[in-house]
Amino acid sequence: MKKNLLLILALTSFAVSKANPLPSPPPAIGLSELSFNSNGDWIIELWYEGIMPDYGYNSVDSVFICSSTGRARLKNETFDGYFGLMLVRKDSLLSNLNINPEGDSIQIEYYYKHYLGPETALAEPVVFGNFRNATLNAPKVGESIATYSVFSKYSDYNYRPIYENIYSTDKSSNLGNENDSTGMCGTLKGKIYDQNNQVLTNSNISFYTKAIFGINPSSDGSYSVRVFSYKNHITQIFYNEGSSRFTVDITPIDINVKPDTVITADIHIERITSVNEIKPDPASILNVSPNPVKDLLVQYEISIPVRSSTSYFELINMSGQKIAQIPITENAGKINLPANTVDGMYTLRLFVNNKNYANSKIIISGE
């Protein structure tokens, strides 16, 4: 009898879990690779993950490719499994879309059904060439703009970008296949100087910043590190010590790395601060606009570093209910609030490394 009861309970538990699966991260769709042929025709490789239509949520309703001159919707929004890659050309879209091979800003916009209801998402734009604020060179024929290693190789069930939102010039285009770092990197080398202008020889410290990982000083203070091909204005680098992350202000460095090139740049440290010790006025940490919010689009600026897998906004209504959690990776940008958010007063809460650093009262008004 006990065996039968246990069997019934196990089957019931399985049925309930299938009917009401645990909430999962929302689907993510981004640009994996972009290239042009000799006629200037473009091809885009999209990556996607978290597609779970069989459970009644995490299904994608529509996907748009956006450039500086317009946007166009994909004809076919059928995804082959939970994660994967998809090639998109002009004839993959319902309308024509121009992308300037000399310079443009490309963004992926998509609409999906999550367990909280209908949602809208915008991937971080890829800005290249002669377009304003570009961080990438325009790709030559045979080259591409690519993000490195879209899916993690550490787990069969945890496909996450290893280096989120890092794009690079790639001289070995690999459309249709998972990207690797071949043909995407140059070398940055030089010496590291501490606040007293003495060479830093502590080889136990490993610094990092966007597109650069593993800056390790040697016994003579020199360093050499592979870096992604990216235009970088560096004012801060970071390192971890125990549970604390330290922010290192440096004399600004401007670099424009191309594949297989070597750039020499000395690093001069000006100030070191633990992010856990930063206690400025919360009002100076977070700035949002416009307020009242129109069209559910919020622009934000944050004065402390947010590069973390656990940095996000929470949208809280007047009853204290969390309406949405929106991940962020940049100190400034735009976020889209959920499409089903009603007009009213809300609190936008900023979390960095799961710690609440600042709150901002916002009014949402559709008028």
Image: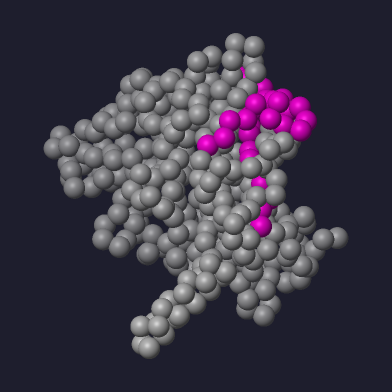
User: Which residue occupies 39% across, 45% down?
Assistant: 152
Q: How many marks?
A: 0
Magenta stretch: includes residue 93? yes
The quarter holding residue 348 reads: bottom right
Magenta highlight range: 85-114
In the orientation shown, which residue stands out farthest toward the bottom?
A: 1
Taking the image as shown, residue 274 lies to the left or right of residue 26, namely left
Q: Looking at the picture, does residue 218 appear above or below residue 308?
A: above
Asked if residue 149 is positioned above or below residue 340 in the image, the reply reads above
Please tell me which residue is depicted at 53% across the width and 37% down the height of the picture.
Answer: 85
- Which residue corresponds to the image point at 45% horizontal and 51% vertical from the top-left? 307
Q: Is residue 116 visible?
A: yes
The answer to whether residue 288 is left or right of residue 151 is right
**x and y percentages locating residue 252 in the rendered image:** 42, 37
194 with respect to 282 (left or right): left
- Would residue 283 be seen by someone viewing this image from the given angle? no
**Residue 9: which quarter of the image?**
bottom left
Q: Residue at x 65, y 26 (%)?
A: 89
Q: Residue furthest left?
A: 219
Task: Work out whether 68 lies above or below 341.
Answer: above
Which quadrant is home to the C terminus? bottom right
Residue 197 part of the magenta-drawn span: no
- Observer-nearest of 203 and 66: 66
The colour scheme is: one colour
Which part of the image, by quadrant, shows the N terminus?
bottom left
Give the camera-side residue of 366 and 325: 325
Q: Residue furthest top?
A: 38
Q: Nearer the viewer, residue 203 or 141?
A: 141
x, y percentage for residue 81? 53, 46
Q: Position of residue 191 (x, y in %)?
A: 25, 33
Q: Position of residue 221 (x, y in %)?
A: 19, 36
